[in-house]
Image (cartoon, grey):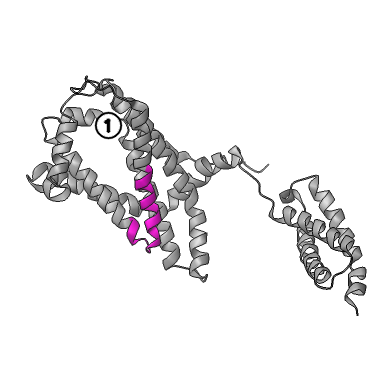
Amino acid sequence: MRVADRLTQREASWRELDTLLDGLNRRQLPAARAAQIVRLGELYRAACTDLMLAETHSLPRDTVAYLHALVGRAHNAVYRAQGFRFVDWADALFGTAPRQLRTDPALRIAALVFFGSFLLCAFLAAGRPGFAVSVVGEPMIEMMEQSYAEPMGANRKDGLSRNDTMMTGYYIQHNTTIGLQCFAYGLLFGLGSLYELVSNGAILGTVFGHMATSPNASHFYTFVTAHAPFELMAIVFSGAAGLRLGYGLIDTQGQTRLGSLQREARRALPTVGVAVVLFLLAAFLEGYVSASALPYSAKASIALFSAGLLVAYLALGGRRPVVEPR
């Protein structure tokens, strides 16, 4: 049978696809019946084959143009982009993410590694002279002492005014860099994320422990208290998302490594989104609240409120009310 004759017999299928697409245009594809979606896929694949044959055998231009338009419409219907919807974004952050985190072993491992190294180094730095210098170096210790020699909100000796907006931008860049490293290094079978969690926990814990015994301890803790809950938990969330990537490379569940990595990356994305939000909140608090002249009681209240929000988020987020059957 000639190609032209075969394609002539296919015109009924083209008209069916055309009619089906017109019907789908009047409602979203997810609302269509399963049979319609399956039929759409069959007709779309057949139309692609017909278009290839029509172009290869130089059939009339009108036929080729019609098939081009038909295949294009079908492609858009099958692969149409939903675009950004605030409802989907909010559901991922406040529904999907907390539900996953509550049962995710990666979060428990990340929290144990980060806060374990943090507390261990904090106690060692506070109780053993010279430990802080061996971990972070003498230059960093001297810089920390000089940075917090004056109370928050005091006039600077160099006469320069504080630029809260510029510092907020710096904190956003700095914080997101840490989070990105904790997440992306998970591609090293999770070992990179574990290293980043231990490294950041050890450095931060050492600084906290050393400054607790410093004459400038009150100035330091007045600065770090308000934004600490959001910033520290953002690091833990980023590390947990990175461990998810590593898990996908280790336990493929019968898929290829690439397919398994894609599966875990999709699961980790809501957690990454939450970490980004926490880093941003921490940066704004650090820029506009932590460095201000507000009393320590106010900053401690903000920290307690932030910690309460995090606990409520993990404990209650994404819990939909159960509807009792009638």
Q: Which residues are magenta?
A: 176-193
Q: Position of residue 35 (x, y in %)?
A: 79, 59
**Main SS, magenta residues:** helix
| Residue 307 included in the magenta stretch of the image | no
Q: Which residue is mark 1?
A: 225
305 vs 21, left or right, is left
Q: Secondary structure at mark 1?
A: loop
Residue at position x 39%, y 47% in the image: 237
* Quadrant of the drawing holding the N terminus: bottom right
Residue at position x 19%, y 48% in the image: 120
Residue at position x 29%, y 57% in the image: 195
Q: Report the residue that reaches farthest toward the left.
A: 129
| Residue 184 included in the magenta stretch of the image | yes
Tally of numbered discs? 1
Label 1 Cα crowd, 10 Å radius (few <14 / some 14-19 / many 20+): some
Question: In the picture, residue 229 is in which quadrant?
Answer: top left
89 vs 292, left or right, is right
- The amino acid pointed to by label 1 is Thr
Q: Position of residue 73 (x, y in %)?
A: 78, 54
Residue 96 position (above or below residue 294): below
Q: Is residue 107 visible?
A: no
Residue at position x 25%, y 52% in the image: 199
115 vs 184, left or right, is left
39 vs 5, left or right, is left
Q: Is residue 191 visible?
A: yes
Q: Position of residue 19 (x, y in %)?
A: 87, 54
Q: Report the residue that reaches farthest toward the bottom.
A: 1
Q: Position of residue 80 (x, y in %)?
A: 69, 51
Residue 320 position (above or below residue 224): below
Q: In this view of the protein, which residue sits in the foreground, 120 or 319?
A: 120
* Quadrant of the drawing holding the C terminus: top right
